[in-house]
């Protein structure tokens, strides 16, 4: 086995020293680890855009509610490091929770309207946790660019809003969702699915495609587009639907008349696993 070459940084001070030693521009790929092709596609794009790439791996406690899966969130650091090394990543930031949230920490970045519906409504406090940690990562790493997946479409919209509202000097790049051959969106949480649940899970993407088909057939009623997606989801008894949304892709306001760029998104539970997916229309 070849030795891992990428620099492993554990503290804010180490990251700042590393950043100061770079003359090239720097791209940040923030992650919670347990990396899959979706993460690696972000890394490859970041490398292709030039400069050095730093990846953060931090399972951020503040974006999990007490009832959520923080303790059982999948982790495999040695595998993650090997994958990142093979991709030519220059450095990885592996902070402890205490490094990010030292004693006395009491500041939160709270984004308004775009963070309120959908995942914001289903997971109170989630986007405050995401926005706070991403703002901190931007300030710690001072990257020129940062890369996020469209899989978490609302997260991307929240981070774009925050970056613009706070004049953070970072170019936020959003990249398409990576999917398994059967259409299931790649996610670290797919690891929770039992074989039967895994078999059922591609219905999420099929349902979004049913929405796309209705849209392409000329359907512009938000309610009927939502119903087309919901109906497809009902064909799979293992799936419990949390929401189906037809929203404006920038504001995420729910639409009755589906005009302009749309985000068609859904959240569903399969067993104890909560999955989300989305497509952009047209
Ligand atoms: O998408 C994720 O993995 C996380 O929400 C992020 C952006 C790394 C913040 O913790």
Image: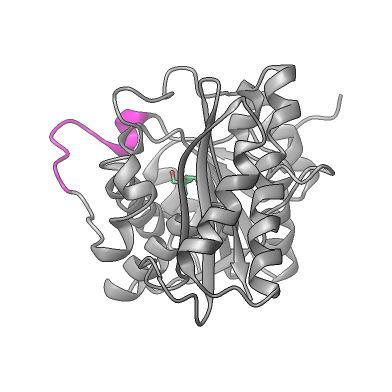
Is 126 on the left or on the right of 87, as rendered?
left
User: Would you say 232 lies left or right of 130 here?
Assistant: right
Quadrant, the C terminus: bottom right
Considering depth in this image, is 77 or 270 the residue closer to the camera? Answer: 270
- Expressed as whole percent of the image width and height from the top left, the position of residue 273 reads 53, 26
Report the magenta stretch's main SS: loop
Magenta part of the chain: 97-107
Tell which of 7 and 258 is nearer to you: 258
Identify the image quadrant of residue 201: top right
Residue found at x 54% / y 75%: 220
Q: Nearer the viewer, residue 128 or 19?
A: 128
How many marks on residues?
0
Residue depicted at 77% across the width and 48% down the height: 87
Q: Which image quadrant: the N terminus? A: top right
Q: Tell me what residue is drawn at x 53 percent, y 78 percent.
A: 261
Residue 145 visible from this viewpoint: no
Q: Is residue 47 visible?
A: yes
Query: Percent x, y for residue 79?
Result: 71, 27
For residue 102: magenta? yes
Q: Quadrant of residue 202?
A: top right
């Amino acid at each position: 086995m070849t030795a891992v070459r990428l620099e492993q940084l554990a503290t804010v001070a180490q990251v700042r020293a590393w950043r100061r030693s770079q003359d090239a521009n720097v791209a940040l790929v923030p992650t919670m680890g347990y990396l899959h092709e979706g993460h690696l596609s972000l890394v490859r794009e970041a490398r292709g855009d030039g400069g050095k790439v730093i990846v953060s791996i931090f399972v951020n406690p503040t974006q999990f509610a007490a009832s959520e899966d923080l303790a059982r969130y999948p982790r495999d650091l040695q595998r993650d490091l090997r994958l990142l090394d093979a991709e030519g990543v220059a450095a990885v930031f592996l902070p402890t929770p205490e490094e990010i949230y030292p004693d006395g920490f009491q500041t939160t970045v709270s984004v308004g309207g775009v963070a309120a519906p959908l995942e914001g409504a289903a997971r109170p406090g989630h986007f405050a946790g995401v926005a706070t940690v991403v703002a901190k990562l931007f300030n710690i790493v001072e990257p020129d660019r940062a890369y996020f997946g469209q899989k978490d479409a609302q997260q991307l919209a929240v981070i774009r809003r925050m970056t613009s509202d706070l004049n953070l000097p970072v170019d936020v790049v959003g990249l398409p969702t990576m999917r398994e051959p059967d259409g299931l969106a790649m996610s670290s949480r797919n690891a929770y699915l039992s074989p039967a649940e895994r078999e059922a899970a591609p219905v999420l993407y099929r349902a979004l495609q049913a929405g796309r088909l209705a849209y392409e057939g000329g359907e512009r009623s938000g309610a009927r587009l939502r119903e087309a997606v919901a109906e497809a989801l009902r064909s799979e008894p293992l799936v419990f639907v949390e929401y189906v949304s037809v929203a404006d892709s920038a504001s995420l306001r729910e639409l009755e008349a589906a005009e302009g760029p749309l985000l068609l998104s859904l959240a569903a539970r399969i067993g104890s696993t909560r999955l989300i997916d989305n497509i952009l229309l047209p």
